[in-house]
Amino acid sequence: MHGRAPPGQPVQDGRHPIDATETHMHWLEHKIPPPVVGATVALLMWLAAPLGPVLTWDSGTRVATAVLLVAVGLGFDLGGLLAFRAARTTINPLAPQRASALVTGGVYRLTRNPMYVGMGFLLLAWAVQLAAVLPFLGPLVFGLYINRFQILPEERVLRQVFGAPYAQYMQRVRRWL
């Protein structure tokens, strides 16, 4: 078992505290593409919708809210994708070690994970459209899963690949929003 260290300090074996908090489920890290996770969560949201209380929203308000959330989500997704393309670095979330450039401009000034933020907004739009209480757990489930099995492992790799510039970027920009 690894000891605890003050925030930002390595634990006794020299690993960063994020690394020391790994669980026995590390085999799930970088295994399922985030769009597949998002689609699975969306399906589960749809299946859960009839199982709980229904929300009585005016149809126009519900649709307008969902469309607005979709627009925001797509804005984050496309902003992240286009920034990666412009930097000519990999967009493959399962292989962060292939990153050839540290992207910190554009939407990456707002969040370190705009594509995951975008997927979260798309799931929130889906919850609004489903107009039931239980689907609103979907974006939370997605965020928790992606944070543990995608983002934390990505951060470990990017710290190794880019070193101090990435550490400075982590200090300046939030993981989510």
Image: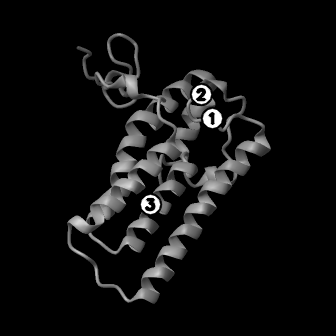
Q: Residue at x 73, y 50 (%)?
A: 82
Neighbour tally class for label 1: few under 14, some 14-19, many 20 plus, Cα within 10 Å: few
Quadrant housing the N terminus? top left
Query: Is 108 or 35 nearer to us in this picture?
Result: 35
C-beta proximity under 8 Å, tags 2 and 1: yes
Taking 111 as reference, is 3 above or below it? above
- C-alpha span from label 3 to label 2: 24 Å
Residue positioned most to the left = 52
The residue at the point 51 percent across, 55 percent down is 119
Q: Out of 168 and 131, give the one closest to the viewer.
A: 131
Residue at x 77% of width, y 40% of height: 87
Q: Position of residue 161 (x, y in %)?
A: 62, 23
Q: Position of residue 164 (x, y in %)?
A: 59, 27
Residue 94, percent across and down? 56, 31
The residue that label 3 is drawn on is: 123
Q: Which residue is mark 1?
A: 92
Q: Where, by quadrant of the figure, is residue 62 drawn?
A: bottom left
Which residue is denoted by mark 2 in the rendering? Answer: 95
Q: Amino acid at mark 3?
A: Leu
Residue 12 appears in which quarter of the rendering? top left
What secondary structure is found at the residue carrying circle 1?
loop
